[in-house]
Image (tube, rainbow, N blue to C red):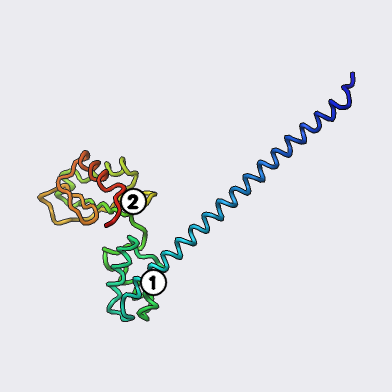
Amino acid sequence: MVPPPFILIKGINHEKLNLYRTRAAVVEKISSEKIRRKELIMAVNSQQTTDREAMGKIIDRYPPERRYILAIMQDLQKQFNYLPKEALQMTAEHVNAPMTVIFSMATFYKAFSLVPKGRVVLKTCDGTACHIKGSNIIIDEVYKILGIKPGETTPDGEFSLETVNCLGACALAPVLLANDRVYPKVTPAALREIIKEHRGQSDE
C-alpha cells in the first residue's frame, strides 16, 4: 500500500531539515573557531605591543652608550624574567652595537636567560653536601608537585626549576633558593609549604 502523498512529503522535509541543521551546526562551529582564533591573534598582538612599549621605556631610561648594556639587560630581565630577542635587538640599536656583542653578554652572565622563566625561580643546590643530604629527593618532589624538571617552567609561567653546583650554604643542606630567599634544610613537607607560600603571590 502506498502511503498518502502528504506523508511522503513530510518524510522528505524531515530529512532535509536534519541536513540543514547539520550544515548549520558545522557552519556555526567553523565560525566560532574563526572568531576564537581571531580573538587569540588580537590578544597576542595586543600583548606584543604592550611588551614592546615596556621594552622601549626601559631602554630609553639609559643614554645610548655601550657601558649601559648590562644595566639595560638587568632591568629587562627583571621585567620579563628573561631577555626577549626583540628587546636585545632594540638594545643593540639603542647603543649602536652589533648583535654579536649583545648576545655574547646575554649568554656570558648566568643571571640572564634567553628563554622565559617562571615568576618564581626555584634553585636547588646539587653540590656534594646537598646531594648527600637529599637534594635529589627535593628535585623529585618538585616534579611531583609542579610537574617540572630542572630547566623547565610550569605552563602557567609561575614556577621554574634550576639546579646549581653550590649555593655556599653547605651547613644548611639541602638548600633551596626561591628567587632571592634561602630555605635551609628543606624536606618534602617544607617544600610543599614553600610552594604554597609563593603560589599566586605577585611581585612586589
Q: Is 125 or 204 nearer to us in this picture?
A: 204
Name which quarter of the figure residue 4 lies in: top right
Q: Is residue 108 found left or right of 8 in the rendered image?
A: left
In the displayed image of the protein, which residue is found farthest to the left? 171
Q: Residue at x 66, y 41 (%)?
A: 25
* Of marks 2 and 1, the one in the foreground: 1
From the image, which quarter does the C terminus lie in? bottom left
Choose the circle earlier in sequence order: 2 or 1.
1
In the picture, the disc for residue 99 is none
Above or below, 49 against 2 in this view is below
Residue 31 % position (x, y): 63, 49
* Residue closest to the eye, 204 or 96: 204
Q: Dot 1, how many residues are within 10 Å of its Cα: few (below 14), some (14-19), or many (20+)?
A: some
10 relative to 62, above or below:
above
The answer to whether 25 is drawn above or below residue 152 in the figure is above
- Residue 106 in view (yes/no): yes
Residue 110, how many percent across, how many down?
A: 26, 63
Which three-letter amino acid code belongs to the residue tagged 1? Gly
Residue 13, x across and y down, in percent? 80, 33
Residue at the disc numbered 2: 158
Residue at image location 17% in from the left, 47% down from the top: 174
* Quadrant where the image shows the N terminus: top right
Which residue shows up at 22% across the image and 40% down it? 188
Element at label 2: loop
Q: Is residue 53 left or right of residue 203?
A: right
Circle number at residue 56? 1
Give amino acid for label 2: Glu
Is residue 137 in view from this perspective?
A: no
Q: Residue at x 31, y 77 (%)?
A: 62
Mark 2 vs 1: CB contact within 8 A: no
